[in-house]
Amino acid sequence: MSRSAHPAGPRHADVLPEGHYTAPADDLNALDPKVWAHTVGRDADGVVTVGGIAVTQLAEEYGTPAYILDEADFRDRARAWRTAFGTDADVFYAGKAFLSRAVVRWLDEEGLNLDVCSGGELATALSAGMPAERIAFHGNNKSPEEIERAVRAGVGRIVLDSFQEIVRVAHIAESLGKRQPVQIRITVGVEAHTHEFIATAHEDQKFGIPLAGGQAAEAVRRALQLDGLDVIGIHSHIGSQIFDMSGFEVAAHRVVGLLKDVRDEHGVELAEIDLGGGLGIAYTSDDDPREPHEIAKALSEIVTRECEGARLRTPRISVEPGRAIVGPTAFTLYEVGTVKPLEGLRTYVSVDGGMSDNIRTALYDAEYSVALASRTSDAEPMLVRVVGKHCESGDIVVKDAFLPGDLAPGDLITVPATGAYCRSMASNYNHAMRPPVVAVRDGAARVIVRRETEEDLLRLDVG
Ligand SMILES: *Cc1c(COP(=O)(O)O)cnc(C)c1O
């Protein structure tokens, strides 16, 4: 094909280089509601707005890059999960996706519980007033100090991850004169990602105690004997960004099998089963996530059916969505610094952030969408790669996407669905200062996590 026909670089689907992308949308100015927070739109001038505020105003006031979080959208999603699961089940928000004190308060107000997996997350939760009994403490290597702090605070459950931890938590609880509610995390040999699951996944991973070889049954046997522990249930978490419920079906079948064995051996019916998180969201228009009410219905039917088959009382179900609540609520706002067309390949668009504020593309080959936000444009679509400003060629934010061909330095662009695992995994690589999280609601914006400063960086560098 002739390159000279496209002097400014590949702009049409028939000359696209290799890569994974969908054809450019008919209208690059359109914002697919699937991938954007609920209150996002464009104003009369074509500027993207969220919660009634234009991104141009947000950029002026808070600078770029910045994570802009739609508080109403967060609360809507949290409430949808809460409502879908009703009073017979518990929803634990997975704090590792994104945690701040404002978020903890919203969760508390919306009636959700909270998962933490480190002393830092626990401290954040407690300092924002989350009642300890609504906190679950996870992790494969909790330190004795972390365990003691959690037990003293009175967390609702500690999820035990190894034989050593069973003894460790029991010992600490006993020495504090307490009986700590615990779940035992098992691996059921199912691994689920997006559209497929492997029912015979080997259990070669750091989390949980394998069901295979009777290890999980042995863990329950030991835990039931310890005075410091109140064994309330079994925990299983099978993957991430899952759209297909059949992995949960196999996992539930295997967890209920263990509950049945425990009943037969000990005469004890464990009261709870936690099916973990991992529910998928739309990063691009190609993704079709399920609604919380469909997920709740499916999970409850699966567990009820399995328990009827095993003649067990149906245990109380809990789930732990992180990404599915906070992921779609936020987008990252960047300013374009340079636009570099590479003939026959694509155009590299450099923004003022990068892998320090979004490591997921480099780490997981994640896919994202992107939109021109400070204006609309009728220019021809051009194939772009949005890259950061770091000294690393893998510093990619959006691998393959289309933006208007007249994109120029100074334009603001937004990458949607960056609420989960972006700020929480952000780094100071190249001594970048981590961006703020700005929450917007009803025409008002406020910083809930402020931007780091050079002072913050230098404060840790004690010479
Ligand atoms: C990471 C994790 C979650 C949350 O996963 P999402 O993909 O954000 O829903 C829930 N439970 C456990 C045990 C996890 O490790």
Image: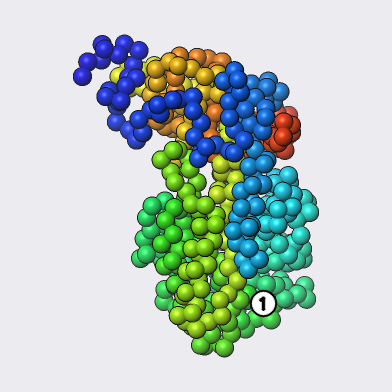
Q: Residue at x 51, y 31 (%)?
A: 31
Residue 138 seen in this snapshot: no
Residue type highlighted by circle 1: Asp
Q: Taking 207 as reference, is 60 above or below it? A: above
Q: Residue furthest front?
A: 44
- Numbered disc 1: secondary structure: strand
- Nearest the viewer among 393 and 320 is 320
Q: Taking 222 as reference, is 360 above or below it? A: above
Q: Residue at x 64, y 21 (%)?
A: 56
Left or right, 345 with reference to 329: left
Q: Residue furthest left?
A: 1
Q: Residue at x 42, y 73 (%)?
A: 212
Q: Quadrant of residue 462?
A: top right
Q: Position of residue 149 (x, y in %)?
A: 74, 62
Q: Position of residue 232 (x, y in %)?
A: 63, 75
- Nearest the viewer among 88 and 367 is 88
Q: Position of residue 68 (x, y in %)?
A: 63, 33
Residue 27 seen in this snapshot: yes
Q: Residue at x 58, y 51 (%)?
A: 322
Q: Position of residue 21 (x, y in %)?
A: 36, 33
Left or right, 83 with reference to 455: left
**Pointer 1 residue:** 230
